[in-house]
Image (cartoon, grey):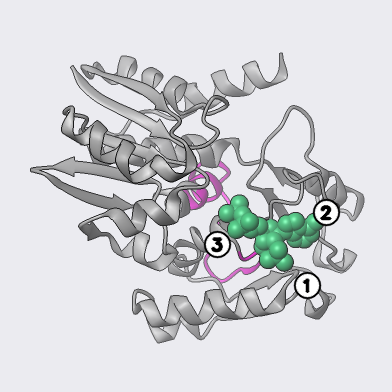
Amino acid sequence: MDRYAVIGHPVAHSRSPQIHTLFAEATRQDMCYERIGPELDQFEVAVTQFMAEGGKGLNVTLPFKERAFALADVQSARARAAGAANTLTFYKGEIFADNTDGVGLVRDIVQNQHFTLAHRSILLLGAGGAARGVIQLLLAEGPIRLIIANRTAGRALTVLSELRASGVVSEDLLAHCQACGLESISAEHFDVVINATSSSLSGGSTPGVPAEVFGPETLAYDMVYGKGLTPFLALARTHGALLLSDGLGMLVEQAAESFYLWRNVFPHTAPVLQQLRVELLE
Ligand code: ATR
């Protein structure tokens, strides 16, 4: 039986084992999926050991995504654009790194929610790992503009310059992308506003954005998910946004892409998403 796992610190809360087990059952794959939670200084040792034991692949979660990228022998363009990896595949003694977060987000928006991103204006809040993981894939959809806005403006500017330096995204697409501080966001409607900050996880206040960024046709998307509306989605609704989405669909879609990379079969995501949604509300 092929072995996979999610590695993180902490890792107990991860839903990946459940999601991948459901995918494996539905597609009749002979595999098992575990959790690995090494001490912070033991990540590389734990990966190498899992590989030596015959493990086939790992999902990587906080805070190891950058180290997973650095550890790999080969890195996909998606991983290079993000500077981080959430999926490792072991093959003939080598480690292949990929990042499926961006495609997970885009599939959730475009396929699950039938919301096209081409020719749209997108405001992306945050410049940490969560934001960096999705910028390339958002730009590939051809938005009219993508503004990366962060509390610390310099970090947003660095993210953009590092993406340019990676050479993964063409100058034509980068011409639609700008970076700024939260205070410099212009007071006008965006078609999509994505929260990629960790404000609700760290218990901080929601990122301060002008109320005008939300219109009735704006899709407000929070990469975080929870039982009720997240603080960011509650704010968006207060300011008039009617299309609200949390990040549960992104979670399932990024997992499906990892599963596909490993097993070469793409699982149906809708039933899994529905099951997780029901469990979240219980
Ligand atoms: P992650 O990998 O989850 O993105 P991170 O690298 O620590 O985590 O980044 C956290 C992001 O959330 C950053 O963009 C951070 O802004 P700063 O770069 O200015 O620190 C943002 N963030 C966290 N709490 C926030 C808050 N209360 N308001 C606005 N932005 C916040």
Disc 1 C-beta below 8 A from ligand 1: yes
Mark drawn on residue 206: 2
Q: Which residues are magenta?
A: 105-127
Q: Secondary structure at mark 3?
A: loop
Asked whether residue 167 is drawn in magenta, I would say no
Quick one: label 2, few (<14), some, or many (20+) residues within 10 Å?
some
Real-space CA distance between mark 3 and mark 1, rounded to the nearest whole angstrom = 22 Å
Say whether disc 1 or disc 2 marks the residue closer to the N-terminus: 1
Say whether disc 3 or disc 2 marks the residue closer to the N-terminus: 3
Residue 15 higher or lower than 170, as above or below:
above
Residue 258 higher or lower than 192, as above or below:
above
What residue is shown with label 3? 117
Which kind of residue does numbered mark 1 sit on?
Leu
Q: Is residue 191 left or right of residue 259?
A: right
Image quadrant containing the C terminus = top right
- Which residue sits at x=53%, y=78%? 160
- Which residue sits at x=52%, y=66%? 118
Disc 2 C-beta below 8 A from ligand 1: yes
Nearest the viewer among 178 and 55 is: 55
Which kind of residue does numbered mark 3 sit on?
Leu
Residue 10, image x, y percentages? 55, 33
Q: Secondary structure at mark 1?
A: helix
What residue is shown with label 1? 182
Quick one: label 1, few (<14), some, or many (20+) residues within 10 Å?
many
Which kind of residue does numbered mark 2 sit on?
Thr
Nearest the viewer among 53 and 31 is: 53
Residue 7, image x, y percentages? 41, 35
| 3 vs 1, front mark | 1
Residue 77, image x, y percentages? 31, 65
Residue 29 visible in rendering: yes
- Which residue sits at x=43%, y=81%? 164
